[in-house]
Image (tube, rainbow, N blue to C red):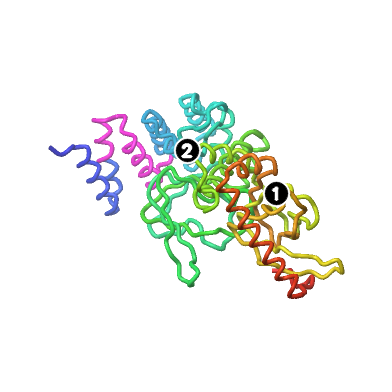
């Protein structure tokens, strides 16, 4: 026998799609009479009231929805309903009560000693940190087929998908644009924009109606001024995600065991790089192993007579600095950032502890380093000179 709640919910959705908002509202309210703690029905009532311009009623409905989602253990949706209170003009006291109620309900998973919360975005946040962060979040709704972010455009925020589905698209080498991944509820994206002012690396387009939470760089700076720990927790969160992606996709590092990856992840440091900043200096002792996350770098060799010779340009995803660490010799080429960028840096001691201790991995690194040394030797032999002006991109 068909669940009457399912039937009523589908009827309400059809009415809403037809623009019969008052009838849809009545249908959802009938559902709530029979099932007062139906979080989805509470949410839809709040949204319809907001669309109808009845903000006072909508405010009370969003507060009920947040409580209902919290009882179901859905923190992300509970936060989104709480954030909506600010959008509909609810008094600041009402939003504060809502946020603190969530912090209290999820207190165990939000304690700073916890390694992973119910939603990674809020992992290891204490109560006051959580409240401060929620205050600067905004909830956004996108219709199907709408771009959330566009590849190549400047980025200044990160998102968490609350409801719906989206696709990640990127320009391919043949000039076409292809889908390279999907975003599902609970997933976060765009976090690199919080530590870099570079362009978006991919586009995210909604495949269906989507609700997202957005944290802007300005919002993050605001909350960090009041609760400094929030900045550290969030940096740890997106650094861990970046390292996890690297360890999963890099052929060199994907061979590590899960335990080795977890240990290595903790020692990588996320670092912004300024244009023209020198990361490695020829002739000096290498201090770290680097992964270029964003931007471009030109490695170059310098002759004693001052001539500069360019090597192959480093692009996003490339690694460098391993030769000096492997051979325990001075850096063989200077690496300078062409543009503003972001790198992951693994200090020398961590490199030796995690990577050189693995025989197979050490062999791969040695081969890669040898190939780079051979390329450098070929450039030196060619005598090709690169003038200062040619280093600009």
> Relative to the observer, which residue lies in front, 256 or 7?
256
**Above or below, 295 relative to 114:** below
What percent of the width, then of the height, locates residue 167?
41, 56
Query: Mark 2 highlights which residue?
Result: 85
State the CA–CA distance, disc 1 to disc 2.
54 Å
Location of the N terminus by quadrant is: top left
Q: Nearer the viewer, mark 1 or mark 2?
A: 1
Query: Mark 1 highlights which residue?
Result: 325
Instruction: Identify which residue is drawn at 31% across, 38% down.
Output: 41
Instruction: Identify which residue is drawn at 34% across, 34% down.
Output: 39
User: Dividing the picture into quarters, in which one does residue 60 lie?
Assistant: top left
Q: Is residue 180 magenta?
A: no
**Above or below, 126 relative to 145:** above
What percent of the width, then of the height, locates residue 298?
70, 64
What percent of the width, then of the height, locates residue 180?
44, 59
Sequence-earlier tag: 1 or 2: 2
Location of the C terminus by quadrant is: bottom right
In the displayed structure image, the side of residue 279 where residue 238 appears, left or right: left
Q: Residues within 10 Å of mark 1 (few under 14, many from 20)?
A: many
Element at label 2? helix
Q: Is residue 50 magenta?
A: yes
What percent of the width, then of the height, locates residue 320?
66, 55
The range drawn in magenta is 27-56
Instruction: Identify which residue is drawn at 45% across, 47% down.
Output: 212
Instruction: Identify which residue is drawn at 57% across, 45% down.
Output: 359
């Amino acid at each position: 026998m068909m669940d009457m709640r399912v039937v009523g919910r589908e009827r309400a959705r059809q009415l809403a799609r037809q623009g019969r908002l008052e009838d849809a509202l009545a249908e959802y309210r009938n559902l709530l009479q029979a099932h007062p703690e139906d979080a989805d029905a509470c949410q839809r009532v709040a949204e319809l009231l907001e669309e109808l311009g009845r903000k006072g009623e909508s405010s009370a409905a969003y507060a009920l929805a947040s409580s209902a989602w919290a009882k179901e253990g859905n923190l992300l949706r509970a936060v989104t309903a709480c954030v909506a209170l600010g959008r509909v003009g609810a008094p600041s006291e009402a939003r504060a009560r809502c946020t603190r109620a969530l912090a209290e309900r999820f207190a165990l998973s939000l304690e700073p000693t916890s390694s992973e919360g119910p939603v990674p975005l809020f992992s290891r946040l204490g109560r006051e940190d959580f409240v401060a962060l929620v205050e600067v979040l905004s909830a956004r709704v996108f219709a199907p087929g709408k771009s959330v972010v566009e590849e190549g455009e400047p980025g200044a925020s990160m998102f968490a998908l609350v409801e719906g589905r989206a696709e990640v698209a990127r320009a391919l080498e043949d000039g076409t644009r292809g889908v390279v991944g999907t975003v599902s509820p609970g997933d976060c994206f765009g976090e690199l924009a919080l530590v870099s002012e570079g362009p978006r690396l991919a586009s995210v387009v909604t495949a269906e109606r989507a609700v997202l939470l957005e944290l802007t760089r300005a919002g993050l700076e605001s909350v960090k001024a009041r609760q400094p720990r929030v900045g550290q927790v969030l940096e740890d969160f997106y650094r861990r995600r970046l390292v996890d992606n690297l360890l999963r996709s890099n052929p060199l590092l994907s061979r590590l065991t899960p335990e080795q990856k977890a240990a290595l992840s903790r020692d990588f440091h996320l670092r912004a790089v300024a244009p023209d900043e020198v990361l490695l200096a020829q002739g000096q002792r290498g201090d770290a192993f680097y992964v270029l996350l964003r931007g471009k770098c030109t490695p170059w060799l310098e002759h004693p007579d001052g001539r500069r010779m360019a090597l192959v340009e480093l692009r996003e995803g490339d690694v460098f600095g391993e030769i000096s660490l492997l051979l325990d010799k001075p850096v063989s080429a200077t690496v300078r950032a062409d543009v503003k960028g972001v790198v992951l840096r693994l200090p020398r001691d961590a490199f030796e502890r995690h990577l050189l201790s693995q025989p197979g991995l050490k062999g791969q690194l040695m081969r890669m380093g040898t190939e780079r040394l051979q390329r450098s030797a070929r450039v030196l032999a060619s005598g090709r000179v690169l003038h200062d002006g040619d280093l600009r991109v």
